[in-house]
């Protein structure tokens, strides 16, 4: 099995007598199997705490490296110490050969794919829960998903309350005039929630209209 193309086993410290030509620069696509993502590529960025360093965005943080791919401790980098104690680089150039080598060496993770993007996109993390045979995928923000979950939770509460009221009426547990008042309140609550749920339904339908499934409730 061939070695990774930019593998270098020489000790790398700031007092090296032989100057090394930088292998990496901002914008390069690289592989970093030590992070646990296997052969997933990352994009290199300028490290915000030190102008001479680069970083990739993963695990909800910026992980620093020097231009030869050696890992730099974040605490050290932020105080200006960019010396590494590693004896081998952590980054590798993203090539089909390197992907194949890393995939065979580390195997493929069964965890959901986590994709990091540019820092300009707020270090966005995408949790991929799709199946291998899914041929249409919609990216949904966590905030929007949270809003949908809140709407579902609220509607479940209202439906449970109405169900309990109907049970009380059925078993004659409340007086007729009380049942009438409670039924009126339940009707108003159901109408209110129908209106509230219509807006998220329209938003979801606008997206579904672009898929083969089409809009629901039309």
Image: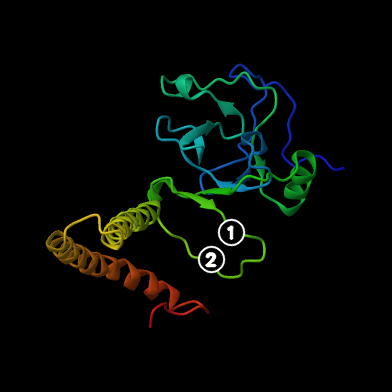
In the drawing, does residue 53 fall left or right of residue 103? left
Residue 46 pos. (x, y %): 46, 40
Instruction: Give whichever of discs 2 and 1 has the lower sequence position.
Output: 1
Pointer 2: what residue? 137
Q: Is residue 62 above or below residue 187?
A: above
Of 207 and 67, nearer the camera is 207
> Whole-Å distance between the Cαs marked 2 and 1?
7 Å
Residue at the location (21% across, 69% down)?
191
Relative image position of residue 29 (x, y in whole percent): 59, 49
Secondary element at image label 1 = loop
Determine if residue 43 is in view. yes
Residue 132 against residue 113 in the figure, above or below = below
Q: Residue furthest top?
A: 15
- Residue at 36% x, 58% y is 152
Which SS class for mark 2?
Answer: loop
Q: Do residues under tags 2 and 1 come within 8 Å of each other at their CB atoms?
A: yes
Q: Quadrant of residue 6?
A: top right
The residue shown at (61%, 29%) is 70
Relative depth, front residue between 50 and 60: 60
Are there few (<14), some (14-19), or many (20+) residues within 10 Å of tag 2?
few
Which is more toward the observer, 9 or 134?
134
Residue 176 numbered tag: none
Q: Position of residue 34 (x, y in %)?
A: 65, 33
Give the position of the N terminus as an image quadrant. Answer: top right
Residue 141 placement (x, y as % from top left): 40, 55
The circle drawn on residue 130 is: 1
Which quadrant is the C terminus positioned in? bottom left
């Amino acid at each position: 099995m061939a070695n990774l193309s930019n593998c270098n086993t020489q000790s790398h410290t700031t007092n090296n007598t032989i100057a090394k030509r930088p292998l990496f620069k901002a914008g390069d696509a690289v592989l970093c199997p030590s992070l646990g993502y296997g052969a997933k590529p990352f994009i290199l960025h300028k490290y915000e705490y030190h102008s001479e360093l680069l970083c990739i965005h993963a695990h909800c943080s910026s992980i620093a490296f020097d231009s030869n791919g050696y890992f730099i401790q974040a605490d050290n980098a932020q105080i200006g110490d960019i010396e590494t104690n590693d004896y081998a680089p952590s980054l590798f150039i993203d090539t089909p050969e390197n992907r194949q080598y890393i995939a065979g060496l580390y195997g493929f993770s069964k965890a959901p794919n986590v994709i990091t993007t540019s820092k300009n996109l707020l270090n966005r993390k995408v949790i991929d829960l799709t199946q291998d045979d899914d041929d249409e995928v919609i990216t949904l923000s966590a905030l929007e998903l949270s809003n949908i979950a809140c709407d579902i939770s609220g509607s479940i509460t209202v439906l449970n309350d109405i169900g309990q009221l109907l049970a009380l009426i059925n078993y004659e547990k409340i007086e007729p005039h009380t049942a009438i008042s409670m039924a009126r309140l339940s009707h108003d609550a159901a109408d209110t929630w129908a209106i509230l749920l219509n807006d998220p339904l329209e938003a979801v339908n606008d997206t579904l209209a672009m898929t083969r499934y089409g809009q629901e409730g039309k």
